[in-house]
Image (cartoon, rainbow, N blue to C red):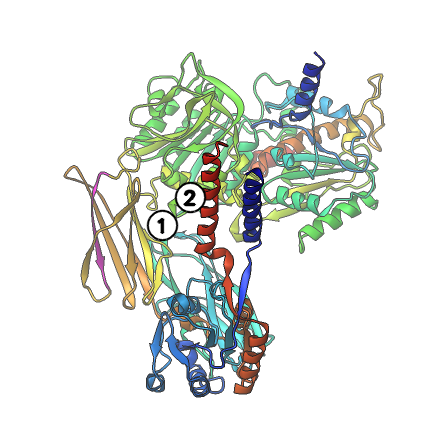
């Protein structure tokens, strides 16, 4: 009997820890795990996905996926979110994977938990990306960027604390007449912080300076971010422009 | 007895260890006048004067060596080696078309026993073999004397051209050329893109240093259709070593303008995002697209002016615009939810019947029971059998297994073997609608094996004068993102979708009979491989055909060619560029006495030999070659008879003839005999 138990334990030990499965064509809330404070708002993804379910027809996976740049499985998720409050340290292999991820069509959203554009978090992102893409740099996203029009028509940026009135992005591609795309987006205003609730279900932080109206704008911008990841510059197509211009005149 | 058997096995084991370390036996060579093979390069590059003619220097050195070492045999070589006498050497001129050092070493040392080799060359290897590998396997030292002097070298050359496989009329096409300039420091060099004598583009490069290699890019908008012979040409400078390499021609096939694609997606997802970006990035595609961003069931207590949503086009509007589209793509689009009626499909049906095309990218909304597409007039256009009780969805990963590798949609590479390798290396897709099969007459282009059963993934057919395809997965984006085993999966993804558009729209590039030449141009005396692809009316590759091939040479002489079958539906034959000018290949295909189709292509045999492309001496190669054989490399300035003597004496002390023991057949025979002896012994003594 003992022998069987040993065999059983050995057999279990030799089994793969978990067979990795992707999510097909569904949107998946993927978040990067790194050495810093990568997960300050663990209950936020579920709230965001609930809003996705209510307001959109996006098919999505109910579970958040935690991904790592050291792991090839990152390529299963063409969009992931990075939270942080200090300098990000990527190994050469992780940097290589980040570049491959972007080059192959992936989109990355960096959200600054401290809402401090002059802090180490953004400095490290900028340095990493500018090393990976010499000659390219972060640029302010203009008010007519597809991100602000992909579902809700938004006139301003949002987040828990409006430390800057702009977001920034890095555009890649576009050589040889092809379409360039904003593959990296940086939010200096802690977008996901506006979603965070405490254990009693109350919002954990007040939104500064705009209060609850700013929170609602943050929710809308989060939905726009997801749509932007899925549809790119769709709302820039000529067919949409007369309708959008007309609505913006309200 | 047991001790004897143990001893035999021990000997065998030690023998095998001995072989594993690849021993080399060096036989001391104390011969004062070793049998020497003297190889003299007489290819065209040896005619360069930098400052003295390389071949004259080679001849002088060869005669000196011959005098000092009378036990030498002389060979001249270019594309092959030939034994020559002293008198023949005096009359020899550097006119060989190709420097093939590897082939020369192979030919000279293959059968004849020499104790030493001396090679005199400029090192500009042009042949396919690797001279370093050949030299390393000789077992005797090669003394190499390198001629030519880079400091006297002056040359501008068009090294290579990067152009797309085909271009589109009225659309900008990017053509790049790599230009090198040596010995022209401070000069400005004009580079022109020309069609005949007409200049299509002009660029200037600065030769800032003595040796420059840079790329120039032209943007050209072709105005006409057909095969265009284009040339990239540079200025010529006085004193250039070669002017043949100052221009390079190539052929570019120009097809029709861009294709208008209507792409409607019912559910946003990664497939839509990637495919939209692919279409938007393809200059040959003009895209109009709609993606449904919410359903009627979604809560939206928000004023309309706060949303970017626009009204979906009315059926009348879509029908009115239908004639302007070449391809219509519906992805998981349940049209019945948007006030559209089957009347829309009547218009699409007419469009396809008249030569248009339709692609259905579907999941459960399209191909499952209750599908709005299962209506008379719609479902019979779609090449798969669906609306069946057994239809279901498999969320698992699966391998996209091509059934027809040579189908134009799956043709990622010209070479069929390479094409097959790419498909087998691509990452798995995920999620497939399982339908029982394809309809009669449809091509099952790719399948997946799920639970031991084969299901169609991609199928297509001709419908009226147009084409319809059904793709039952929406995860081709994974080819763009995931690693797989293919080093460049993104290229495969892009090419797959380009092919899809071209084939569905019946583009000129994808006819039922195609003939083409790998590389599209040849140099004088170069042999290339031409291929013919043959498909039946359902685009299945077929081989039971009669093929008539005619080659029309630049002088108008016609030659009949009999091609060989390479694989199903693919035939090939070699073509040699015997004279300069434009050749034409015409192909007629007959099946069961009827003409199935025909095609023709042109290719150009270009001026200049590969040998003349680059005339710089390559002493680094010669040095490596000499050292790999255990010999020594001398430049023209370093070489003297005294230096050669010193090396010979040194070599006598340290080495001599090297014998590769581990390749000896006698050793293997010996081991085999011991094994047999051991077996017989055991059998006799009853140990078996």
Q: Nearer the viewer, residue B143 or B185?
A: B143
Which numbered disc, 1 or 2, marks the residue that appears first in the sequence?
1
- Quadrant in which the N terminus of chain A appears: top right
Residue at left 71%, top 32%? A31
Q: Residue B510: horizontal and vertical position, in percent? A: 34, 43
Within 10 Å of disc 2 (Cα), the crowding (few <14, some 14-19, many 20+) is some
For label 1, the residue is: B255
Q: Residue B356: horizontal and vertical position, in percent? A: 34, 35
Regarding mark 2 in the picture, which secondary structure is present there?
helix
Q: What is the count of numbered marks?
A: 2
Q: Whole-Å distance between the Cαs marked 1 and 2?
A: 23 Å
Res. A6 in view: yes
For label 2, the residue is: B419
Within 10 Å of disc 1 (Cα), the crowding (few <14, some 14-19, many 20+) is many
Relative to residue B632, is residue B64 depicted above or below?
below
Please state the extent of the stretch shown in magenta in the rendering.
B544-553
Q: Residue B434: horizontal and vertical position, in percent? A: 45, 20
Q: Main secondary structure of the magenta part?
A: strand
Regarding mark 1 in the picture, which secondary structure is present there?
strand
């Amino acid at each position: 009997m003992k022998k069987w138990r040993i065999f059983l334990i050995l057999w279990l030990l030799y089994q793969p820890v978990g067979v990795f499965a992707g999510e097909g064509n569904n949107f998946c809330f993927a978040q990067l795990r790194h050495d810093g404070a990568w997960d300050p708002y663990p209950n936020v993804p579920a709230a965001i996905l609930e809003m996705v379910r209510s307001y959109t027809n996006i098919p999505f996976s109910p579970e958040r996926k935690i991904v790592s740049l050291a792991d090839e499985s990152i390529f299963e998720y063409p969009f992931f979110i990075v939270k942080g409050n200090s300098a990000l340290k990527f190994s050469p292999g992780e940097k290589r994977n980040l570049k491959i991820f972007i080059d192959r069509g992936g989109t990355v959203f960096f959200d600054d938990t401290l809402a401090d554009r002059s802090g180490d978090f953004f400095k490290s992102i900028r340095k990493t990306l500018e090393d990976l893409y010499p000659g390219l740099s972060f640029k302010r996203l203009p008010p007519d960027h597809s991100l602000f029009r992909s579902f809700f028509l938004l006139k301003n940026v949002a987040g828990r604390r409006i430390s800057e009135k702009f977001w920034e992005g890095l555009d890649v591609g576009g050589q040889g007449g092809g379409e360039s795309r904003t593959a990296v987006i940086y939010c200096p205003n802690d977008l996901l912080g506006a979603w965070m609730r405490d254990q009693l279900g109350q919002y954990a932080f007040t939104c500064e300076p705009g209060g609850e109206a700013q929170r609602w704008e943050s929710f809308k911008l989060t939905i726009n971010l997801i749509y932007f990841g899925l549809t790119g510059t769709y709302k820039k197509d000529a067919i949409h422009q007369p309708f959008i211009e007309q609505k913006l005149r309200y | 007895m047991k001790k004897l058997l143990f001893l035999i096995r021990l000997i065998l084991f030690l023998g095998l260890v001995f072989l594993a370390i690849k021993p080399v036996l060096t036989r001391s060579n104390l011969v004062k006048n070793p049998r020497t093979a003297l190889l003299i390069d007489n290819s065209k590059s040896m005619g360069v004067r930098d400052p003295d003619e390389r071949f004259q220097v080679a001849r002088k050195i060869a005669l000196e060596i011959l005098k000092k070492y009378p036990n030498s045999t002389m060979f001249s070589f270019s594309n092959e080696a030939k034994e020559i006498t002293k008198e023949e050497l005096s009359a020899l001129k550097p006119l060989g078309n190709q420097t093939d050092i590897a082939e020369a070493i192979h030919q000279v040392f293959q059968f004849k026993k020499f104790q030493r080799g001396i090679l005199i060359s400029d090192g500009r290897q042009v042949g396919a073999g690797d001279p370093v590998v050949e030299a390393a396997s000789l077992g005797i030292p090669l003394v190499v004397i390198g001629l030519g002097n880079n400091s006297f070298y002056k040359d501008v050359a068009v090294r290579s051209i990067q152009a797309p496989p085909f271009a589109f009329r009225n659309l900008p096409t990017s053509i790049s050329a790599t230009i090198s300039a040596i010995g022209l420091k401070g000069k400005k060099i004009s580079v022109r893109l020309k069609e005949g004598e007409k200049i299509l583009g002009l660029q200037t490069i600065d030769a800032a240093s003595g040796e420059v290699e840079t790329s120039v890019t032209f943007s050209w908008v072709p105005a006409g259709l057909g095969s265009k012979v284009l040339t990239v040409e540079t200025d010529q400078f006085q004193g250039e070593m070669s002017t043949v390499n100052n221009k390079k021609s190539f052929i570019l096939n120009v097809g029709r303008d861009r294709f208008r694609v209507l792409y409607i997606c019912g559910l946003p997802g990664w497939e839509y995002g990637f495919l939209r970006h692919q279409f938007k990035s393809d200059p040959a595609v003009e895209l109009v697209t709609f993606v449904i961003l919410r359903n009627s069931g979604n809560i939206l207590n928000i004023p309309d002016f706060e949303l970017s949503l626009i009204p979906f086009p009315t059926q009348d509007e879509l029908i009115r615009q239908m004639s302007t589209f070449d391809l219509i793509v519906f992805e998981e689009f349940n049209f019945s939810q948007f006030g559209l009626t089957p009347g829309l499909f009547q218009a699409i049906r007419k469009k396809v019947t008249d030569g248009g095309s339709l692609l259905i990218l579907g999941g459960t909304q399209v191909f499952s029971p209750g599908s709005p597409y299962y209506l008379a007039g719609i479902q019979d256009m779609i090449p798969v059998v669906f609306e069946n009780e057994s239809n279901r969805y498999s969320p698992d990963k699966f391998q996209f297994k091509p059934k027809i590798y040579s189908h134009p949609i799956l043709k990622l590479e010209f070479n069929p073997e390479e094409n097959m390798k790419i498909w087998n290396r691509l990452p798995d897709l995920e999620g497939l609608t399982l339908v029982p099969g394809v309809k009669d007459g449809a091509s099952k282009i790719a399948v997946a094996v799920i639970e031991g059963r084969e299901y169609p993934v991609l199928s297509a057919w001709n419908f009226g004068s147009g084409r319809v395809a059904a793709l039952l997965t929406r995860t081709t984006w994974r080819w763009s993102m995931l690693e797989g085993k293919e080093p460049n999966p993104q290229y495969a993804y892009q090419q797959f979708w380009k092919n899809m558009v071209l084939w569905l729209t019946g583009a000129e590039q994808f006819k039922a009979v195609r003939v083409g030449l790998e590389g599209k141009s040849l140099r004088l005396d170069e042999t290339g491989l031409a291929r013919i692809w043959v498909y039946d009316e359902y685009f299945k590759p077929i081989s039971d055909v009669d093929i008539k091939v005619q080659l029309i040479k630049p002088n108008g002489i016609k030659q009949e060619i009999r091609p060989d079958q390479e694989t199903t539906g693919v035939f090939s034959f070699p073509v040699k560029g015997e004279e300069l000018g434009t050749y034409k290949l015409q192909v007629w295909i007959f099946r069961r006495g009827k003409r199935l189709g025909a095609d023709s292509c042109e290719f150009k045999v270009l001026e200049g030999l590969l040998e003349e492309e680059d005339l710089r001496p390559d002493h680094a190669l010669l040095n490596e070659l000499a050292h790999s054989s255990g010999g020594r490399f001398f430049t023209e300035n370093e070489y003297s008879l005294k230096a050669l003597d010193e090396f010979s004496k040194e070599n006598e002390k340290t080495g001599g003839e090297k014998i590769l023991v581990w390749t000896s057949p006698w050793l293997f025979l010996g081991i085999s005999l011991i094994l047999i002896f051991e077996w017989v012994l055991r059998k006799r003594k009853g140990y078996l």
